[in-house]
Image (cartoon, rainbow, N blue to C red):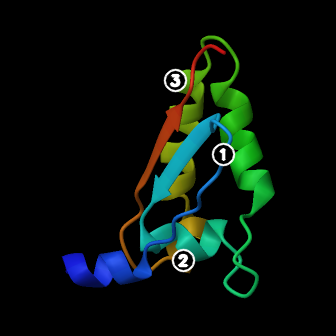
Amino acid sequence: HEAVAEERAFFAKSDQMPDAIYVFSDGIQHLVVDPISGQIHRPFFERVFGALCQPGEDERASQWLAEMAQSEPVRRRTDDDIGIAIARRLGP
């Protein structure tokens, strides 16, 4: 499984320090990345990142993610696990 995961992983290199890093399972990949263009679904990431950037909103963002992952529309569109990890940079 490890070799297959490495083949399917997507990495991007940037000279800039990222504000956030998202890692997600293939179970939600087609919900957050356009399969043809490879571009992210901006509204999803803007909503999550916007909530995480507000002081004290980490819990609310986490709750929203959990509810979204368990919602009927998402469960209908996924046939696999739903996993996401988000890291946010604090400070300058």
Number of other residues with Cα within 10 Å of mark 3, as a class: few under 14, some 14 to 19, many 20 or more: few
Disc 2 vs disc 1: Cβ atoms closer than 8 Å?
no
- Residue 59's tag is 3
Question: Height in image: 63 above or below 77?
Answer: above
Is residue 27 positioned above or below 20 on the image? below
**Which quadrant is the C terminus positioned in?**
top right
Q: Earlier in the sequence, mark 2 or mark 1?
A: 1
Place of residue 65 in the rendered image (x, y in percent of width and height, measured from the top left): 54, 44
Q: Amino acid at mark 3?
A: Glu
Helix, strand, or loop for circle 1? loop
SS class of the residue under badge 3?
helix
Q: Are marks 3 and 2 in contact (CB under 8 Å)?
A: no
Quarter of the image for residue 21 reads top right
Question: Residue type at mark 1?
Answer: Asp
Identify the residue under disc 2: 76
Whole-angstrom CA distance, mark 2 to mark 1, is: 38 Å
Q: Specify which label sits upstream in the sequence, 3 or 2.
A: 3
Q: Residue furthest left?
A: 1
Q: Residues within 10 Å of mark 1 (few under 14, many from 20)?
A: few
Residue 91's x, y, as percent?
62, 13
Tag of residue 15: 1
